[in-house]
Amino acid sequence: MRQFPSLAMEVEGVDKIRQDFPILQRQINQKPLVYLDNAATSQKPTLVLQVLDDYYRCHNANVHRGVHTLSEEATASYEHARLRIARFINAASYKEVIFTRGTTESINLVAHTWGRTNLRPGDEVLITAMEHHSNIVPWQILQAQLGFTLRHISVTPDGLLDLSELDSLLTERTKLLSLVHVSNVLGTINPVPELVAAARRVGAIVLVDGAQSVPHMPVDVQALDVDFLAFSSHKLCGPTGVGVLYGKRALLEEMPPFLGGGDMIREVKLSGSQWNTLPYKFEAGTPAIAQAIGMGAAVDYLTAIGMDWVHEHEQQLTRYAYERLGQIAGLRMLGPGPEARGGLIAFTLGDIHPHDLSAALDHEGIAIRAGHHCAQPVHDHFGVVASARASFYLYNTPDEIDQLVVGLEKARKLLAF
Amino acid sequence: MEALYREAIIDHYKHPRYKGHLADPDIHYHDHNPFCGDDITVELKVEDGIVIDAAFDGRGCAISQATASMLMEEVVGKSLADLKQLDKAYILELLGIEIGPVRLKCALLPLKVLKAGIWGLDEWPE
C-alpha cells in the first residue's frame, strides 16, 4: 500500500498518481491533455488495464457454469471483485452487492422490482429537482403505469435542497425517497444522513444515486443507513459497462427478480421456476465478467490511495478552482460555495454557448463537458439552457486549473460579444 | 484557438446578417436541437417562386448562428426550387472548416429549418 503525505496538494503524490494513468501522456491538438471531464467518466490506471488484459489473455471463461479450470478461475475473480467492492462501501455482505450495467440500470432495477410490487395509487415517491435524468425518468415511466404520485424537493437559489418544506413533502404517504448524493451539475453534497433519518420517521425507504459520490469520497452504506445505493464502475477508474446496486438484504430478499434468464434461477421447469439466492437472483445472463473484475481492481487502486485522500485532494482543487474561476469576468458558477460541494463546477461564461467553450478549450487540449449533463430540470431551474462543466479527480493538479483559466480567458476574447 | 473558427464565422456570429423578423412572411418555420439548445427560426418573403427577403432568429452556438447568418445571405434572390437542392456539402463549403459529427448537427440546423419551411412540412421527417 502506498503512503501519501497528508498535505493533499503535495505535488509528488499527484505526480506519482499521474504516472499510473497512461492516457494523461496524450497530446490533444499538440497540447498536453488536461482532462477535466471526470464526472462524465474517469480515466483508467495501468493496474485496471493490466487486469483486463490478463483476464482475457489467461483466464477468460464463463462464470458459475463450467467445471473446468478457466471457469473456476473466472468465477473466483468475479466473486472476489464483488467481495472487495462490498468492503469498499462497507456492505454487511457480498449478497447485497448486485452487478448491473451501471447507475442507470441499478435505479431501473429498483423501479421495476421494488417499485412494481410496492407502489400503488395514493403512494408517493419523492425525488429532488437536482436529479440526473436516470433518477427521474424511471419513476415517471412507472408512475404512468402504476398511478402513484411523484413529488420533488426543490432547490434553493444557492443550489441546496430546500428542506423547509420537507415536512409536507415527506409524509406517511411517501414510500420511497430517491435522491442524488452529489449533484452532477451543482456539485452539491446532499445531507443524506439527515434525510435518511427523516425518511425513517415516516417509514419510507431511501435510494441514493452515488454515481458522483462513491468515486470521490468515502461512502459507508451502513453508516449512512441507506436502503439502496447505485453507482458505476467507469466513474471510479474502472471499465464501462458495469456498476453496482447495493441493497439491504431484507429488501432484496423480498423483491421479485429483474430480468429472467440463466444464472438467476435455482430450478426451471416448464410449469414454473424458482429463483436463485442473492445476489444472483438479479444477475440474469452472462454478466460483464471482465468489467466487474476490472472494477474490483479499480476499487483496490482507490483503496490503496485512500478515499479520504482522494476527497481531500478534490476539495482543495475545487476551492482553488472556485477562487480562480470566480475571477473571470462574466463567469457564473452554478451551485453552492466550495465548502459544500464535490469536485465539479458547472458554469456559464457570458452569452458564449457551452459547446463553443468546450470546442475552444479542446483546441488547448482541455477536455470539459458542455450541455445539460442529463439534468435538464436543474438547468431550467437556474434559467440556463446548458452549461460548461469542469470536474476533477485524483490525478488533476492546480496547474491544470490555471490552464483552464487561461483557456477560458482566450475563449472569452475570441467569442464574447 | 484563433484557428478554431474562420474569421468569417466569428464575424457572422458576432454581427449576424438578416437577423430578426419579417413583417409579413410567406414562409415561417422554427426548430431546435434539444441536445444543445440551438434554436433557429427562418422567415422568407417569396414572389413568383423567388425569395425576395429573408430573416432568421435564434440562439445557440457560434456554428449554428453563423451558419444561419451565412445561409440567409445566400438565399435572397434564389428560387425555392434551387433552395430545395441545397445539401450538407453546400453548408460545409459555406463554413469552410472541418467539423466533427456532433457539431455537424449545429451546422445543419439552419438548412433543416429553411428546407422544412420551403417544403411546408409540419414536422421534419426523422
Image (cartoon, grey):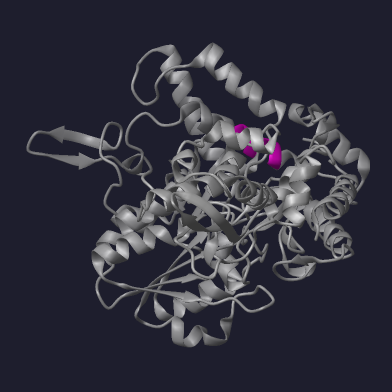
Q: Position of residue A8 (x, y in %)?
A: 87, 50
Q: Quadrant of the C terminus of chain A?
A: bottom right
Q: Is residue A231 above or below residue A298?
A: below
Left or right placement of residue A380 versus residue A388 in this view: left
A213, B110: nearer the viewer: B110
A396, A93: nearer the viewer: A396
Q: Quarter-wise, where is residue A192 in the image? A: bottom right
Left or right placement of residue B103 versus residue A283 in this view: right
Looking at this view, name the residue that lies furthest to the front: B48
Magenta stretch bounds: A296-302
- Which residue is at a point 70% across and 55% down the rendered structure image? A388
Residue A70 appears in the picture as rendered: yes
B26, A302: nearer the viewer: B26
Q: Is residue A297 above or below residue A100?
A: above
Q: Quarter-wise, where is residue A185 in the image? A: bottom right
- Which residue is at a point 87% across and 49% down the rendered structure image? A410
- Which residue is at a point 23% across and 36% down the rendered structure image? A266
**Residue A299 within the segment the image draws in magenta:** yes
Residue A217 appears in the picture as rendered: no
Q: Position of residue A307 (x, y in %)?
A: 72, 49
Q: Quarter-wise, where is residue A297 in the image? A: top right
